[in-house]
Image (cartoon, grey):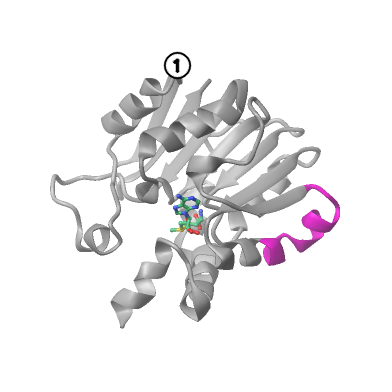
Amino acid sequence: MFDRFYLNARKPKGLGGCLILARMNRFEHARLAKWGLGYLLLQKDDVCLDVGCGGGANIARLLRLCPEGKVYGLDYSAVSVKKSGRVNKKAVKEGRCEIVRADVNTLPFAEESMDVVTAFETIYFWKPIESAFAQIYRVLKRGGKFFICNESGKNSSQPSERAKLLDMTVYNKDELERLLRSVGFTVVHTYSRDDNGWLCSIAEK
Ligand SMILES: C[S@@+](CC[C@H](N)C(=O)[O-])C[C@H]1O[C@@H](n2cnc3c(N)ncnc32)[C@H](O)[C@@H]1O
């Protein structure tokens, strides 16, 4: 029963999906996002895309950090799209925010249309990861940034029970940097918190 509930982290569905998204917004991912965003330099008019936007709390953070910009949220779960729209209702009404349902491997955005793409707690589920990263590279403008923020930074060669249950691929710093460079990103910086394994990478096109 608990396993079924936690499977919602991969693709939220139904009531369990709504509950897990509310928890992520309020508790589980809030501290991680605040820590990681401290490393990301944003301009007030940046156009941002948050991939795997879940409950939409990070869309709200990006809207506050880019008050003259626009923020798109994207997720392949209908429940996540609905919740993100509700959380950011005012900005959606004002035309400063749009939420779309799609898979990261088929991003419905034009080439070089985004200043920043963010991915909080989601790349573990992207398959194949190379093609997802190539899509993000495609939609970023020259000099644009791809920001990844992960709670699980892999500190053992064995996958955890949670990673096995959710069929997650957990990447360490070297694996992430190699993947990012393989699709064309040049400058890549990674920051980590050794006490709890948190990791964030910022790659520049
Ligand atoms: C663990 S939740 C994280 C949600 C949010 N980013 C946060 O930090 O609270 C992962 C989210 O990524 C989405 N996701 C996973 N794989 C995806 C894919 N291939 N394309 C689009 N969204 C995806 C899931 O539906 C889910 O909403």
| Farthest bottom residue in view | 1
- How would you rate the neighbour count of disc 1 (Cα within 10 Å): few for under 14, some for 14-19, many for 20 or more? some
Q: Secondary structure at mark 1?
A: loop
- Residue 177 % position (x, y): 34, 27
What amino acid does circle 1 point to? Answer: Thr
Q: Is residue 70 visible?
A: yes
Count the marks: how many? 1
Residue 144 is one of the magenta-drawn residues: no
**Disc 1, ligand 1: is the CB inside 8 Å?**
no
Q: In front: 175, or 12?
A: 12
Q: Is residue 91 magenta?
A: yes
Side (left or right) of 174 relative to 182: left
Q: Which residue is mark 1?
A: 186
Question: Residue 196 location, x and y as percent?
Answer: 31, 50
What residue is shown at x 16% (from left), y 46% (from top)? 156
Name above or below for residue 177 compared with residue 93.
Answer: above
> Which residues are drawn in magenta?
85-96
Q: Which residue appears farthest toward the left when viewing the image?
A: 158
Q: In which quadrant of the rendered image does the N terminus lie?
A: bottom left
- Looking at the picture, does residue 172 appear above or below residue 138? below
